Image (spheres, rainbow, N blue to C red):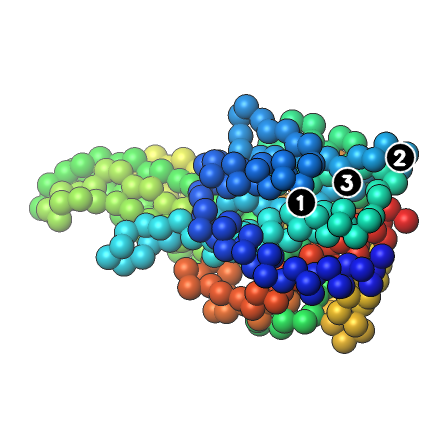
Amino acid sequence: MLNKIKEWTARNRTQLESTYGDLHRRAEASWHEYNTQTYLCAELERMGIPYRTFPDQTGIVAEWDEGEAGPTIALRADMDALSHEMNDDGRQIIHSCGHDAHMTIVLHAVQCLRQCGFRPRGRLKLLFQPAEETGEGALSFIRNGVIEDVNGMLGIHLRPIQELPLGKASAAIYHGAAAQLRGEIRGVQAHAARPHLGVNVIDSLSAIVQAVNAVKTNPGVPHTANVTQASAGGTINIIPDYAVFGIDLRSQTNDGMDDLIRRVRRGVLSAGTANGAEVTLDVATRTAAAAPNPMMERIVSEAIREMLGEEGWSPPIVTSGGEDFHFYPLERPQLSATMIGLGASLRPGLHHPDMSFDLDALRHGVSIMAAAAVLLFK
């Protein structure tokens, strides 16, 4: 079967690239992946794979069940794209994180298995998940009971050239935890010539930036805390009374993130209110850190070596980036899961509007994911 998978991906390279191009042109923001959903549903119907959608979101869950007893294995792909400021062209939605490639790989991994004559001893589920970039898409699938029957789950993510070149893959990505905080500051307007009669929210903002930069947590746990958004004022000769700001937090562990959020919140509220302003701070989005699964990593490592050779295997990637995939095993501890890191010679980096990668990575991803599914059913 593994040799058949290799042959299938080599023969169908043009088809993979065509699907990728179709999905790339349908880039849509989180929770608005309507055209993407329509396209994927049509492809699933063409393949003869039953699927279901949801009234409250754009996700799709498809199932391949030949009626044989066995485990339920899920292949997951994210659907959403990102909004970028493009100078004179305004904001554009662009697939700059590779989700178009992930959908292509999952869709054709099951097509490959079916056309190669594979029959799952159990059920193979395809999870096309919306809104990964918000950190809420996986949780929405969990709330809808999508993974209640799942025993093993595979995800996949393209990696930038700084981590993996084309032709290499890792059996896991150890993402860190991430959180985005949003805050508001309310002060008192006044004439700029009489600042003592007002409460200047820009003074509060300045103090908040310094407070965030001064936060100290356990140096043994990699972490960052940065004010990444700030907006206040409108007229130069008026003391502004309203401001909004955003803070991006990263920590390599979930416990580290809990501690970081506590310390940042305490610093922000203390510094921001020192001049009499009122400050509120809430967690807007949060993703979980990865929980390594040695058993899943051994199986996926075998698939990588079979498809790319010994030289194609790389150890797990440790990154401060976040991924809501890791909510699945966190919320359901009995679920075995890992995310494949796929070398694609991706430049200049993820979340860059000019991101591009070598399309040969598509066939590598399909072959690894299809082979890993075969080994998991064994």
Name the one closer to the observer, 224 or 50: 50
- Proximity of marks 1 and 2: CB atoms separated by less than 8 Å: no
Camera sees residue 371: yes
Residue underneath mark 3: 124
Q: CA distance from mark 3 to mark 1?
A: 11 Å
Q: The disc labelled 3 sits on which kind of residue?
A: Leu
Does residue 262 appear in the picture of this structure? no
Q: Residue at x 64, y 29 (%)?
A: 52
Name the spot of residue 71 as percent of width and height, x first. Answer: 86, 38
Q: Amino acid at mark 1?
A: Arg
Q: Which residue is mark 1?
A: 76
- The three-letter amino acid code for the residue at tag 2 is Glu
Residue tagged 2:
68
As drawn, is 111 to the left or to the right of 373?
A: left
Q: Residues within 10 Å of mark 1 (few under 14, many from 20)?
A: many
Percent coordinates x, y for residue 178 in the rendering: 56, 49
Viewer-nearest of discs 1 and 2:
2
**Left or right of 70 in this view: 263:** left
Please state which of residues 358 and 203 is positioned toward the viewer in this rendering. 358
